[in-house]
Amino acid sequence: MKITALIEARPFCIFDTGPMEKLKKEGVNIIDMRGSGIDDPKFIEALKDVDAVLCGNDLFVNDAMLDMAPRLKAVAKMGVGLDTVDIKAASNHNAIVFNTPGANNQAVADHTFSLILSLARKIVFCDQSLREKRWEHTKIMGIEIWQKTIGLIGLGAIGRCVALRAKGFSMKIVAYDPFWPEEFAGEHGIEKIEIDDLLKVSDIVSLHLPLTEENRGMINKKTLQRMKPTALLINAARGEIVKEKDLYNALKDNVIAGAGLDVFENEPPTNSPLLELDNVVMTPHIAAFTHDAMNNMCTGIANQLIEYAKGNRPAHIVNPEVFDRMKT
């Protein structure tokens, strides 16, 4: 079937236009509004006549947005996170939702370890010191991560990739996940542990879980106080999992030693007090931004959109019952 797709996702095809060209070649009519959004009248007008939206993390797909798009039957979400998509609302509007799980696992796992190592060896501080013409090699003392204990909250696809990297540093790996991957954990010697115990024993606590209402703010004053005073917290998942005010106080008061953050409660974190602290390493939500991961995401989401246009079920549909209804 001939479909019209609105492209909202800002990073779609910024490095390689191949997936965009493939969509056009397969007969998908493209409305390119990358970088635009729901506050743009032209964007709202365009929504009236689209069958599909290809979106990133900036567009909130909810009842209000779906009401503006009466023809919309497919939400193509780049990446794996679906916290900006109301699945129930989409289903009620008879719109399927699909994403690209696995496309950025390696990139996010790499970035997780870049944050860990930057904190452990004070890389950012050392770089700044040299740029300011200071040579302070006798004053800067780092820590080794060799054979330390890393606690992974979330042992899904990305958490497992982090675990494999941790093995390279001979780290003891403990983890919590309500959907425990028994075979993988057994094969790689990962200890199953409850969150409270994980916080107490870990030298590094790394978050690898999707944002839900249940885990929003799960890292807070109470949970931070359970961590070692020498521990590091890493978050390359979702900012809202951590209460930033509580984290700021914990870092300022040396309740924990440091934090590596790629995500924030409010993005960009322009007014965050975390910017004042030296024991925080921050990056602008770029853990998944590598050429490889971006190519995987763009290719994966474009191929699924093409399959939908052909009347086939996308590979990573999250509400398949809606697709089944379409076919009956």
Image (tube, rainbow, N blue to C red):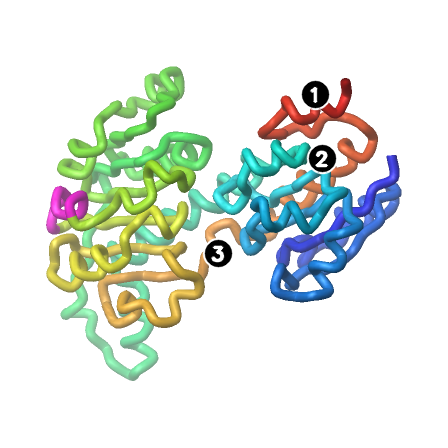
Q: Which of the 4 quarters of the picture holds residue 266?
A: bottom left
Mark 3 secondary-structure assignment: loop
Question: Vertically, is 80 above or below 141?
Answer: above
Q: Name the kind of residue labelled 3 in the image.
A: Ile
- Residue 293: in sight, yes or no? no
Q: Which of the 4 quarters of the picture holds residue 130?
A: bottom left
Q: Quadrant of the C terminus?
A: top right
Q: Quadrant of the N terminus?
A: top right
**Residue at numbered disc 2:** 304
Q: Is residue 252 magenta?
A: no
Q: Name the kind of residue labelled 2 in the image.
A: Gln
Residue 87, position in %: x, y? 55, 36
Q: Which of the 4 quarters of the picture holds residue 123?
A: bottom left
Q: Which residues are magenta?
A: 222-229
Label 3 or label 1, whichever comes before in sequence order: 3
Residue 317, position in %: x, y? 63, 29
Question: Vertically, is 131 above or below 216?
Answer: below
Q: Name the kind of residue labelled 1 in the image.
A: Asp
**Residue at numbered disc 1:** 324
Residue displayed at 73% across by 53% down? 47
Front one among 167 and 299: 299
Question: In the rendered view, does 143 fall on the left or right side of 291?
Answer: left
Q: CA distance from mark 3 to mark 1?
A: 36 Å
